[in-house]
Image (cartoon, rainbow, N blue to C red):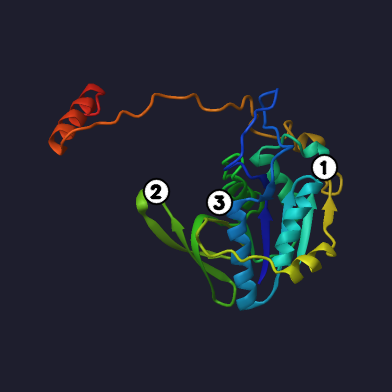
Amino acid sequence: METVVCVKHVPETAEADIVIRGDERGIEEKDLTFDINEADNYAIEEALLWKEKFGGSITVITVGPEDANMTVRMCIAKGADKAIRLGDERFEGSDSYAIAKILHAALKDVEFDVVLTGIQASDDGHGQVGPILAQLLGIPHAAYVIETEIVEEGKLARVQRELEGGLYEVVEIELPAVFTIQTGINEPRYASILGIRKATKKEIALSGLDDLGLQEDDVGEAGSKTRLEKLFLPPVGERAQILEGSPQEVSAALAGLLKDKGVI
C-alpha cells in the first residue's frame, strides 16, 4: 500500500492571544507555537494503520518554509518512510487552488494507491486542497471520511463519509484516489523517543518552483483564484439574556422573546 499524506505546518491558536498584522492580511506569528494541522494528524495515523496491515510505504509531503521540517520529521518519527517539502518564497500568497497545483506538480509522476489529506486546515478553515488535487490528478476522491476499508487486494476502497444533517453514506471508490480525513476517525499515536532520534537524521527532499516545472504565474497570488483582502477579529455582539423565574414564567418569557424577534 503506497500512501501519500499531505500535511500542513500551522500555528496553535486555541489558547493564544491573536494579533492581526499591520497589513491586516495575516497574524503575528513570532510568539506562536507551530505543529501539524489537527486533521492531518488523523490522516497520518490512518496511513500508519494501513502500513501495519498491508505493508508498503508512506510519503509525507508539505508546502511550507524550512520550519515545516519539524512537522514532517514528527511524521517520520511515528513511522512514515519519506518526506518531501515544497518550499519557495514565490509560493507565498498561494490559495487552496495554487497549493493544489504545487502538490500536483510534485505528485503527478509518483506511483501511489491513495493520497490522504486532513478534512480542513485549522489556521484558515479551508478544506479545498484535497478535492482540487484529485481533480488535477484525474482520480476520484471522497471527503469527510470517517471510516476506511481497503478491499479487492488494494484495488478498491470502501469508505464511510459524514454528511450534513447527521447522515452518513458508504461508497466504494476505485484506487488510486484522494481521501480527506475527518478528525475522530482513529486515535493518533505519539512518536517514540527512538523514533524522534531517527527522524532527526532522515533526509527531507526539497523542491522549489523551478524543480517542479512551474512558472511564477502558476503560484502565489498570480496563480490563485482567491485573494485574502482583510483579516479581522469578530465584533463583540450583545450579551446573553438570562431568564429567571419558575419554569412557567421562563417559558412564557422565552415565547414572548421569540415572537418579538420574528422567530415564531
The kind of secondary structure element at disc 2 is helix
Which amino acid does the dot numbered 3 rest on?
Answer: Ile
Where residue 28 sits in the image (x, y, percent)? 70, 32
Of residue 76 and residue 165, the one placed in the foreground of this image is 76
Point out which mark residue 88 bears: 1
The kind of secondary structure element at disc 3 is loop
According to the picture, the residue beneath numbered tag 3 turns out to be: 119
Which amino acid does the dot numbered 1 rest on?
Answer: Asp
Which amino acid does the dot numbered 2 rest on?
Answer: Glu
Left or right of 191: which side holds 152?
left
Left or right of 257: which side holds 177?
right
Q: Is residue 75 above or below residue 103?
A: below
Where residue 123 sits in the image (x, y, percent)? 61, 41
The kind of secondary structure element at disc 1 is loop
Mark 3 or 1, nearer chain start: 1
Q: Residue at x 83, y 57 (%)?
A: 205
Q: Is residue 124 above or below residue 106?
A: above
Q: On the rendered image, what quadrant is the C terminus found in?
A: top left
Where residue 144 sits in the image (x, y, percent)? 50, 54
According to the picture, the residue beneath numbered tag 2 turns out to be: 164
Of residue 147 and residue 243, the one placed in the foreground of this image is 243
Left or right of 167: which side holds 189?
right
Where residue 164 sits in the image (x, y, percent)? 39, 48
Left or right of 261: which side holds 126?
right
Q: On the rendered image, what quadrant is the N terminus found in?
A: bottom right
Q: Residue at x 63, y 45 (%)?
A: 12
Q: CA distance from mark 3 to mark 2?
A: 14 Å
Mark 1 or 2, nearer chain start: 1
Q: CA distance from mark 3 to mark 1?
A: 25 Å
